[in-house]
Amino acid sequence: MKTQGGTVKRTALTLFASIAVAVAAVGGILFGYDTGVISGAILFITSEFALPPTLEEIATSSVLVGAILGAIAGGLLADRIGRRLSIIAASVVFLAGTGIVVGATDLSIFLVGRVLIGIAIGVASFVSPLYISEIAPPAFRGGMVSLNQLFITFGILISYGVDFLFSSSGDWRAMFALGAVPAAVLLIGMVLLPDSPRWLLSRQHMNRAIAVLEKARGTGDVFGELDDIKKAIGMQKGGNWSDLLASSIRMPLIVGLGLAVLQQLTGINTVIYYAPTIFQFAGLHSAGASIAATAGVGTVNVLATAAAVVLIDRTGRRPLLLAGIAGMAVSLAVLGAGFAFSGAVQGGSLLGLITAVSLTAYIASFAIGLGPVFWLLIAEIYPLNVRGRAMSVATVANWAANFLITLTFLTLVGILDQAGVFWLYALVSIIAWFFVLRLVPETKGLTLEEIEEHFRAGRHPRELKGVARPRD
């Protein structure tokens, strides 16, 4: 089957491509594990270091400072030294940061380690899906890039299980130490894999690019795709930060930045980081019980993301986004109502049930929409010469919004109370729904070069129409 351009054959999924994608997606486990592990560990860190609420927020959000720095540096690294070496460097930094956190004797040393971990996940958070997007066959790209998000949710779930395992002993150091396992797997795996064919071609490594593309497509007939990639490279200039100001990139940047900020302002990481705290607000006062309830939410996160991986190349990006964000808005509104009327429902433990159901629905809605689709779209909509830098900008915005929400959650609860905070997130979700309706394109089944050509022609994102995946 031919693409709209009539040159690129839609190839089958090969074992090599599957292995390469699976290894790179381990970066998602790092991202997810470190995102989730703090939710249980902070209960014991706060006690050991005698942290007031402000320092508790700083301890929780310090990793995000590093993530912002990593996202800034990662764009330059990904374009200059390649996607593969960038992921390898992130793995090494993650291992170093983990060692410092585990050995921390006071808050300042702990913060240094957390910032280093943040730098690593700031790089891996977008370079892993970038690598996957450039090696995956177009017809399977959505599901394969979304595998990274599935691994993020898997990492979060593992961290919740680890938190529960050590909750009776309060050994938060062991909670963090186990994060070294996926980091070592990612490091070894990426050492054995090649770089992406598109980056190799952009650096004139023709023979290596052909060899990787042939292995990834399972055929020697890759010259149609090579010609399209070379044509796209030939129409590009430079690859500098100033190129992000080009008119053809303006609309993709708006889409990427808008989704980056809205994904976080809907409150997702307050739930991930503070889920045990939220359950304690709802009446589950024991650390073990609140962490166990959080693990249930994490299981739903994995299952819903797995559903998104299956659906994303069939139903498309936009339908999943619109359905998922609508579900987020409704569940947040219900959660806020539960806390608003807590005086009426607390006695019968109804508030705990409302909280569990609402958080579960909220996580499931996020996991099938904004969670995977944001990372997929920013790996698809930017031209090759600035793809790393453009993804870096979107990722910086994402981590900055994450930092803002995480740093202010407990403060906002003190000002607005729990109901007001969740209603605020529901309002942002409604804004996000209309943003997607008006501006987000459909990219399913298209090659990266077809998407690039659309925006270079100055067309509106909504005019981009995906194509159906051929039957397996």
Image (tube, rainbow, N blue to C red):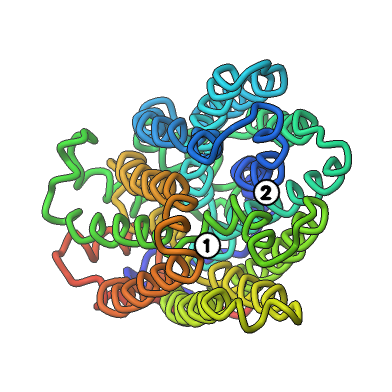
Circle 1 packing at 10 Å, graded few (<14), some (14-19), many (20+), is: many
Q: Amino acid at mark 2?
A: Ala
Q: Look at 26% across and 77% down and name the residue there.
A: 462
Badge 1 or badge 2: first in the primary sequence: 2
Give how far across and how far down residue 313 sits, in percent: 53, 73
Disc 2: which residue? 22
User: Is 22 drawn above or below residue 359 in the view shown?
Assistant: above
Give how far across and how far down residue 92 sits, in percent: 61, 22
Q: Nearer the viewer, residue 201 or 246?
A: 246
Give how far across and how far down residue 446 sits, in percent: 40, 68
Q: Nearer the viewer, residue 356 or 209?
A: 356
Circle 2 packing at 10 Å, graded few (<14), some (14-19), many (20+), is: many
Q: Look at the image and tell me in which quarter the C terminus lies.
A: bottom right
Q: Nearer the viewer, residue 119 or 139?
A: 119
Q: Look at 55% across and 41% down and name the residue there.
A: 212
Observer able to see residue 24: yes
Disc 1: which residue? 372
User: Is 141 drawn above or below residue 133 in the view shown?
Assistant: below
Give how far across and how far down residue 442 sits, in percent: 37, 74
